[in-house]
Image: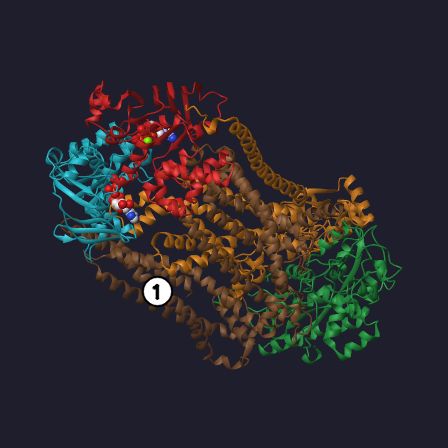
Chain colours: A brown, B red, C cyan, D orange, E green
Amino acid sequence: MSPTLLLLLALGLGLAGWLAARARAWSFRRASPDGRLASLPSYHAWYVALWIVLPVVIFVAAWSAIAPGLVTQAVLASPAADQLPAFGFQRQTILNEARAVATGAAQGVFNPLANEFVEPYRQAIGKYNWIGIIVTVLIAFLGGVWAFLRLKPDFAARNRVEKIVMAILLGASLVAILTTLGIFVSLVFETIRFFGMVNPIDFLFGTHWGPDPMANAANPDPTRYGAIPLFWGTLFIGAIIAMIVAIPLGLMSAIYLTQYANPKLRAWVKPALEILAGVPTVVYGYFAALTIAPAIRDFAISLGASSASSESALAAGLVMGVMIIPFVSSMADDSIAAVPQAMRDGSLAMGATTNETIRRVLVPAALPGIVAGVMLAVSRAIGETMIVVMAASTAANLSANPLESMTTVTVQIVAMLTGEGSFDHPATLSAFALGFVLFLVTLGLNFIALRVVKRFREAYE
Amino acid sequence: MSARDVSVFYGEKKAIDNVSIDIPTKYVTAFIGPSGCGKSTFLRTLNRMNDTIPSARVEGEIMLDGEDIYRSGMDVVQLRARVGMVFQKPNPFPKSIYENIAYGPKIHGLAESKDELDAVVEKSLRRAGLWEEVKDRLQDSGTALSGGQQQRLCIARAIAVDPEVILMDEPCSALDPIATAKIEELIDDLNGRYAIVIVTHSMQQAARVSQRTAFFHLGKMVEYGRTSDIFTNPLEQRTQDYITGRYG
Amino acid sequence: MSARDVSVFYGEKKAIDNVSIDIPTKYVTAFIGPSGCGKSTFLRTLNRMNDTIPSARVEGEIMLDGEDIYRSGMDVVQLRARVGMVFQKPNPFPKSIYENIAYGPKIHGLAESKDELDAVVEKSLRRAGLWEEVKDRLQDSGTALSGGQQQRLCIARAIAVDPEVILMDEPCSALDPIATAKIEELIDDLNGRYAIVIVTHSMQQAARVSQRTAFFHLGKMVEYGRTSDIFTNPLEQRTQDYITGRYG
Amino acid sequence: MSEQIAPTRTPAFEARLKKRYAAEKRFKTMGLAAIVFSIAVLIYLLGTMTLNGIGGFQRAEVAVPMDFTQAGISADPSVMGTSGAVQSLEAQGLPDVVEYFAVEALGEEGADEIGSQAWRDVAAAISADPGIVERQETFWIPASADLAQGLAGEGSPELQALASSLAEEGKLAKNFDTGFFTRADATNPQQVGIWGALKGSILTMIVTLALAFPIGVLAALYLEEYAPKNRWTDLIELSINNLAAVPSIIFGLLGLAVFLTIFPSYRSAPLIGGMTLALMTMPVIVIAGRNAIKAVPPSIRDGALAVGASPVQVVFHHVLPLALPGILTGTIIGMARALGETAPLLMIGMRAFVASPPDSFTAPATVLPMQIFLWSDEIDRGFVERTSAAIIVLLLFLLVMNGLAIYLRNKFEKKW
Amino acid sequence: ACGEKGAEPIHAVGSSTVYPFAKSVAETFNRDYPNLPSPTIESTGTGGGFKLFCNGLGEDKPDIANASRRMKASEFATCQQNGVTEIIEIQVGLDGIALASAKGGITMNLTPKMVYEAIAARPYGGEQTNQKWSDVDASLPDVDILVYGPPSTSGTRDALKELILEVGCDTNPEMEALKDSDKDRHAQLCTEVRSDGKYVDQGEQDNLIVQKIEGNPNAVGIFGYSYLEENADKVQGLNMNGVAPTYENIANFEYPGARPLYVYVKKAHIGAIQGLSEFLTQWTKMWDRDGELAKIGLVANPDDVMAKSMSAATNYDTLDGSELK
Ligand SMILES: Nc1ncnc2c1ncn2[C@@H]1O[C@H](COP(=O)(O)OP(=O)(O)OP(=O)(O)O)[C@@H](O)[C@H]1O
Ligand SMILES: Nc1ncnc2c1ncn2[C@@H]1O[C@H](COP(=O)(O)OP(=O)(O)OP(=O)(O)O)[C@@H](O)[C@H]1O
Ligand SMILES: [Mg+2]
Ligand SMILES: [Mg+2]
């Protein structure tokens, strides 16, 4: 029997317990002199139902892990087992196939030997199904009875049920911590392996990036693993150029929408702007590479910049900036609108014009929210790969000239992980180290941002 | 400042009904009346702060120096610089104390140099009776002050641009008695230098600080006169009832 | 209900200093005093609504039916069902009028059937003097009512769970005089059925609706007694000063 | 007023005032310009995409009249409509029949340029309507990719010539390709469809929503309503904010290292893709959810507490329903981002060729943005238009999702 | 993992170069065996493909790895460690890399030596001073060097290095000698490309390279031959050693840019995974000169290799790890 069916069974039993407990609570209630219970009947019902379902869920989880093993053991004990290949994959597929037929997931077998096992499988599965069902019912029954016997008119069922609810809430918030931990774990081992091959000092402070995934893996050239140009490229494209576009445009849009535009226009323009963030990045990539980049090159050449190439950090950054306008504008819009009216009134009553009020009072007061929006936007920009690949190429340059080609950390991560290099090569492993460092950096930045925002937040309350 | 047949509407609803009043230039005028009678609404019409409420509409004329402030060419910015306002809840900007005071002079370009600005800030704080308390921490945030100090800061901010009229909408309702006493002292001090209009729900306060009192009820101005007359010898029964606590 | 040596702290700051008071079960008790003196704070200790303020801490005991409501095993939820509360600003739930009233009875399981619930809703609305005005639109949102109606709705909501005590924190301060009059009428009506404690900043109101008055000042209870005595013949100079408008 | 003119009424003041009004005007114009610029870019992008993509919904087809009365094909009603139909027809020589009629209609050259699999379309039609074999019928059969290119004026000159002559005779035309919405990926641009990827996206989004929404909402409720303010909750807050900022590719590595280790057989499956994207989406929902919960007026909580509701009841009866519109806004932003995301899915095997639409959450699948990415790098030029068409489908999907959220938001929005 | 699934689809992972062909095979296979689930072809990159492939045997592990380079000894060792002992190696065809420019754009008669000198980071260990093609060789036009090519992570780049750059580099006897004395240094000097903007790493987006050179008549693009063929109306191949990049010239190795493409199959999975052997047969049906392989712009194996591949695909000859490097 599949775990799904066992769970359905448990739910059915839980429902039965729920109804029984509720009926009992109602009978208490009729019997009590003031018609009042410590908790509502439905809380009694939930209490019993949870006591039935939760233990069963735990059991089913455990059972679905061990039952297949037990079934296989039983099958292997059958006489036909002697014909099986001794070990390995072949044996496993034959068994799998026989099981698929036995459970009805497949019509016929592909490997004739498997036929022999269909019947043993059927029997073993049948047997363990029964065991599973019986134990499930037993556990449900025991849990249900135990909980049921505790019901009394003054039993604080609500408190207990709510404790479980609180535990679930707490559990949900722990998912974030687990995810963080998961990221850490999934990066750290390969990172350590990488640092075993390339000195972290060379990696973190080197200024030349040019790993060759096809080169000899045994003694990598540490001078080719300097990540500074990547981090610089990331910063330059994602955090400087893109922000120079997105912050003024996003902020000005938000200001116009909250302070000047009439509400009807705002209701239309705001969602329209949000579409900008939803356009697939491939589209932006082509737009950047085939429209913006050549235009920038021609413009630069007309100004006399001889070395202008059509791959430039500027093209990638500009287009990326457009893409993240809505992140800035939406968050800024919300936080400007949330500045207390008293601040606005205070400034207007001093005889300030609207723009003076916005620039000198509203924007500073809304700064935490604006910063949060910018942070989201920056992270989106940093994580973006397609636009960079298409418009700024994948060559790592350490340069302050926006007309040169550059690349970013995430582009390299993707390139290394989906390239032709082998996975024990330091070039490929460097992707994990890059990810790890990037992760630590964002963690640090967020730590600082959180502090700053907290401090700011006290400001106007 | 004088109002002629002023009515104010919020959408369809008439919140002020045909009020005419002359506000003397060197006295403190108090507006009293039960909650919702339109005191705040009328006060805000005096410096066009109700322009910020989209649904609000004003009829009638309000004259300042012989000019109707609702006439089409009126410069609202200048008007508000001339008619300052202090709100019920102290609302200092989340900036330093210095910046709070310097804000008005800066945007209006009233000080030509840093020294001049310093002088304006000091003078305003002194007049607001706050100088001694804050002179050592002008760079602290204005929001770090106590409620009473914040309210005096807001008053200092208003007088920093040298207005002709100061409007105060229940400036003490969020304050404790000691802070309230300080503000009242300050109003006494400023009296004679500026025209002051104060809205209050406390008749005691009106009696203490004002020379003229206007009693509003359900959007109408019921009675207006010398404070002493209103409190001891009101002409209208409603005023009498209100003052003696029959309602409100 | 009675309080013994109750002090309340917000963090370090003492907001209520050693107050002892016996609140009679069938009368209206008014708390008056200048702003910030701790009236609301003390009121909220009576049904442990200050549990929601993380920094608040209570010392002393408050006895309800011979039990200290701050003892460790106390069921706060049940306490609040027994000691209801009405707030300064009317705060109906954004649900239908019916749902607003039925909410309390539902979560406490006070009605076994729909009919019974209907009956409770009708009874509560009648007592709150709102039935006639809303009986045809019980499914309209509670927030669509006027301010005074909303406040009566909140009172109806509080009495729907049949509390022993009703606490009201400036229930009329956001209302116009007509709505205020209705609420006061209602309090008069409820008087005798429930113990009612009302905080007000209006001495007139205290004088009109209460039988007992407590005067608070700077966190201390200065004087407590029959309302008529307090208003005509206070024992303390501070009470006298406040009532006659020297401060506040 | 006083003998001395007030500083706010001097001519100098009025002169400055003029400048300030000018600045005001400039500022407002800048704001308007920012919006106009953003909208213009949007319109440009949408416009070019629509222009490029509109052709992607069509395909070049040739008209082949077939007179089955002479063909000797029998459509056994017991087989037709079942999975054996195609085999049965193939065994009866349907491919040759089709070939024959194609030569009849288009000449040798033209017949070479119908897809080698064209007979399958005919077979499907017969299977659906066995009556066809009794009569004469004109089929529109997809042209080969080369001929389609020729029709578009590209490719070799011979084919261009052939295409234009066929087109003149009315035997070759671009028809609306309804099959584009029912087929999955293929190697031939004439045969591709978007349904496989669209269904993959739908399945993935369902998993993402089913995980990220409850977890995000519950976490937001916990943090905003119950969590004590201590180091522990600071840590949770930090990790949530950080997760919102971590580049998406890193979530792919997480999915690879964690989910695919636990469920190795679900590589490429929407289930794993959805789980990975859920981790990415959850922080966005938490952050937006917390803001929405914060915006619920405390007076509502007080009101409920004061009638004796427990904290859990307060939250689930009052706070959550009121915060829902705001939570939905966050959800939609997060889901929109997840919908367009490719990088993390690269790592868990969704950059794949899947020729049939996924039939369950655990079947191999790809998603719309990935399909767009794959098609954009196809060698065959017929994919250019198809790529744009796929982009339009993605945007429409996005719009539908947004519209739904806005509708729900308005529905739940209550005034207080 | 709970045994409730029907037959597992065939699962291939690996190179994005083999991907189009593998797709095509899978599609035909899917038509011919409609009862079997359609094979899943993933484009993970060769390295990523081998990592998955060598992770062990089992239904949930890929059956096939597509590769645009040969398996490395280290990867083979990983495979062995994880129990993937018997591996069938099949060379399915060749991918030509082609140098091209826009139609009507720059035309040149190049040699590997010229290409090397034009785009190497340090030609023969000296400084790279060539700014224009004419600096490289007087016979070449007087225009700035601008080459769009594959990134270091791609197989095309590997082929470029091996088939053109190293050949050009080794025309210099010093370099030739260095090969034996200091392999790493030789690799570095001979294969590293310049990063001053004259050689532009263009990600693995060959269509984009086509579009970029189309927009710039003086630019040269390096990409898979298939893209050249498909876009014959827009771009023109550049001669190398006087030979044009055409199908014939690549197939007979006269144009120096053909690299082999492989698929690797787990022998243990044949007979265990339904349809796998039929799937292999399907490959052999499609890789002829006039088959699907050629249609998508790849190049068929030379006859001797074809025979060997055919044998591997039908007799399941396994790979001997000692051949690998
Ligand atoms: N923005 C607004 N939109 C619609 N009606 C309003 C608005 N502001 C105030 N009102 C209404 O106008 C009337 C007068 O309000 P106003 O605030 O002027 O009263 P008030 O005398 O200041 O009362 P309080 O003493 O409570 O401050 C009231 O009925 C109020 O409900
Ligand atoms: N949450 C809080 N944290 C810290 N201090 C508080 C808090 N709430 C109130 N106080 C302080 O406690 C004191 C008593 O406040 P309380 O609100 O009880 O006064 P009140 O008598 O109700 O005044 P009002 O008439 O203005 O409502 C005041 O000094 C106030 O600043
Ligand atoms: Mg007011
Ligand atoms: Mg209070």
Q: Is residue A385 above or below residue A259?
A: below
Residue found 51% across the figure and 60% down from its top: D272
Quadrant placement of the C terminus of chain C: top left
Q: Does the residue labelled 1 lie within 8 Å of ligand 2?
A: no
Residue found 31% across the figure and 52% down from its top: D312
Q: In this view, does E81 lie above or below E236?
A: below
Q: Nearer the viewer, residue B222 or E270?
A: B222
> For mark 1, what is the residue?
A56
Q: Is residue D210 visible?
A: no
- Report which quarter residue B200 is drawn in: top left
Estimate how packed mark 1 is, as few (under 14), some (14 to 19) or many (20 or more) residues with alpha carbons within 10 Å.
many
SS label for mark 1: helix
Residue found 34% across the figure and 49% down from its top: D316
The image shows a total of numbered marks equal to 1
- Give left or right: position of A450 versus B193: right
The type of residue carrying mark 1 is Val
Q: Nearer the viewer, residue E191 or A267?
A: E191
Q: Can residue B2 be seen in this view?
A: yes
- Give left or right: position of D312 versus C123: right
Q: Which of D61 and C213 is in front in this view?
A: C213
- Report which quarter residue A388 is drawn in: bottom right
Residue A265 image position (x, y, % from top left): 52, 34
- Give left or right: position of D175 versus E305: left
- State the residue lying farthest toward the right: E139
Residue B173 image position (x, y, % from top left): 29, 36
- Report which quarter residue E272 is drawn in: bottom right
Residue C191 image position (x, y, % from top left): 14, 36
- Chain letter of mark 1 equals A
Q: In this view, does D81 lie above or below E182?
A: above
Residue C87 image position (x, y, % from top left): 26, 40
